[in-house]
Amino acid sequence: AALYAFARVADDLVDVPAPGDTPDRIRARLRGMQDDLRRAVHGETADPRFAVLGEAIRRIDETTSLVQADLTNIGITTG
Protein backbone atom coordinates (compact mmCIF):
# COMPACT_ATOMS: atom_id res chain seq x y z
CA ALA A 1 0.00 0.00 0.00
CA ALA A 2 2.85 2.40 0.80
CA LEU A 3 4.52 1.85 -2.54
CA TYR A 4 1.21 2.32 -4.36
CA ALA A 5 0.56 5.60 -2.50
CA PHE A 6 4.03 6.90 -3.40
CA ALA A 7 3.64 5.92 -7.04
CA ARG A 8 0.16 7.42 -7.18
CA VAL A 9 1.37 10.80 -5.90
CA ALA A 10 4.25 10.82 -8.39
CA ASP A 11 1.91 9.80 -11.21
CA ASP A 12 -0.60 12.51 -10.32
CA LEU A 13 2.15 15.15 -10.33
CA VAL A 14 2.77 14.32 -13.97
CA ASP A 15 -0.70 13.36 -15.20
CA VAL A 16 -2.77 15.90 -13.25
CA PRO A 17 -0.57 18.94 -12.71
CA ALA A 18 -1.73 21.72 -10.43
CA PRO A 19 -2.87 24.94 -12.11
CA GLY A 20 0.18 26.92 -13.15
CA ASP A 21 2.58 23.99 -12.87
CA THR A 22 5.35 23.99 -15.43
CA PRO A 23 7.50 21.04 -16.48
CA ASP A 24 10.36 22.50 -14.43
CA ARG A 25 8.17 22.76 -11.31
CA ILE A 26 6.93 19.21 -11.78
CA ARG A 27 10.50 17.92 -12.16
CA ALA A 28 11.52 19.82 -9.03
CA ARG A 29 8.65 18.30 -7.06
CA LEU A 30 9.58 14.82 -8.31
CA ARG A 31 13.20 15.44 -7.26
CA GLY A 32 11.87 16.53 -3.87
CA MET A 33 9.94 13.28 -3.59
CA GLN A 34 13.11 11.38 -4.48
CA ASP A 35 15.01 13.24 -1.74
CA ASP A 36 12.19 12.54 0.74
CA LEU A 37 12.33 8.86 -0.17
CA ARG A 38 16.09 8.74 0.38
CA ARG A 39 15.63 10.29 3.83
CA ALA A 40 12.82 7.86 4.61
CA VAL A 41 14.96 4.85 3.74
CA HIS A 42 17.41 6.10 6.38
CA GLY A 43 14.59 6.70 8.90
CA GLU A 44 14.95 10.49 8.68
CA THR A 45 11.48 11.71 7.66
CA ALA A 46 8.47 12.99 9.54
CA ASP A 47 6.13 12.57 6.54
CA PRO A 48 3.96 9.52 7.34
CA ARG A 49 3.68 8.48 3.68
CA PHE A 50 7.41 8.34 3.31
CA ALA A 51 8.02 6.90 6.78
CA VAL A 52 5.86 3.85 6.00
CA LEU A 53 7.50 3.34 2.61
CA GLY A 54 10.98 3.77 4.09
CA GLU A 55 10.21 1.12 6.72
CA ALA A 56 8.97 -1.28 4.04
CA ILE A 57 12.14 -0.75 2.00
CA ARG A 58 14.33 -1.34 5.06
CA ARG A 59 12.47 -4.58 5.82
CA ILE A 60 12.91 -5.80 2.26
CA ASP A 61 16.61 -4.94 2.39
CA GLU A 62 17.05 -6.77 5.70
CA THR A 63 15.21 -9.83 4.36
CA THR A 64 17.29 -9.80 1.19
CA SER A 65 20.48 -9.61 3.24
CA LEU A 66 19.40 -12.54 5.41
CA VAL A 67 18.52 -14.67 2.39
CA GLN A 68 21.84 -13.85 0.74
CA ALA A 69 23.69 -14.78 3.95
CA ASP A 70 21.80 -18.07 4.19
CA LEU A 71 22.60 -18.90 0.57
CA THR A 72 26.26 -18.03 1.10
CA ASN A 73 26.36 -20.27 4.15
CA ILE A 74 25.27 -23.25 2.06
CA GLY A 75 27.71 -22.43 -0.73
CA ILE A 76 25.52 -20.57 -3.22
CA THR A 77 26.80 -17.21 -4.41
CA THR A 78 24.31 -14.48 -5.31
CA GLY A 79 26.43 -11.76 -6.73
Image (cartoon, helix red, strand yellow):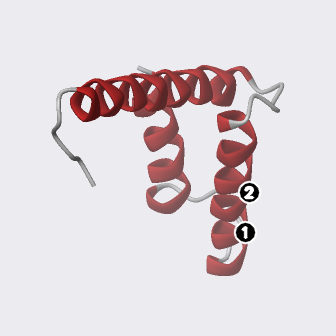
- Residue at 44 percent across and 40 percent down: it is 8
* Residue density around tag 1, few if under 14, some if 14–19, many if 20 or more, within 10 Å: few
Q: Is residue 31 above or below residue 10?
A: below
**Which corner quadrant of the image does residue 29 belong to?**
bottom right
Left or right, residue 75 beside residue 45: left
Q: Nearer the viewer, residue 32 or 38?
A: 38
**Which corner quadrant of the image does residue 50 belong to?**
top right
Q: CA distance from mark 2 to mark 1?
A: 6 Å
Circle 2: residue type:
Gly
Residue picked out by circle 2: 32
Q: Nearer the viewer, residue 62 or 45?
A: 62
| In contact (CB < 8 Å): disc 2 and disc 1 | yes
- Residue at 28 percent across and 23 percent down: it is 70
Instruction: Check the picture and name the quadrant holding the C terminus.
Output: bottom left
Q: Is residue 30 above or below residue 28?
A: above
Q: Is residue 7 above or below residue 19?
A: above
Circle 1: residue type:
Ala
Residue 20: x, y in percent?
72, 68
Query: Judging from the image, what secondary structure is the residue with disc 1 in?
Result: helix
Residue 1: x, y in percent?
41, 20
Residue 33: x, y in percent?
67, 51
Residue picked out by circle 1: 28
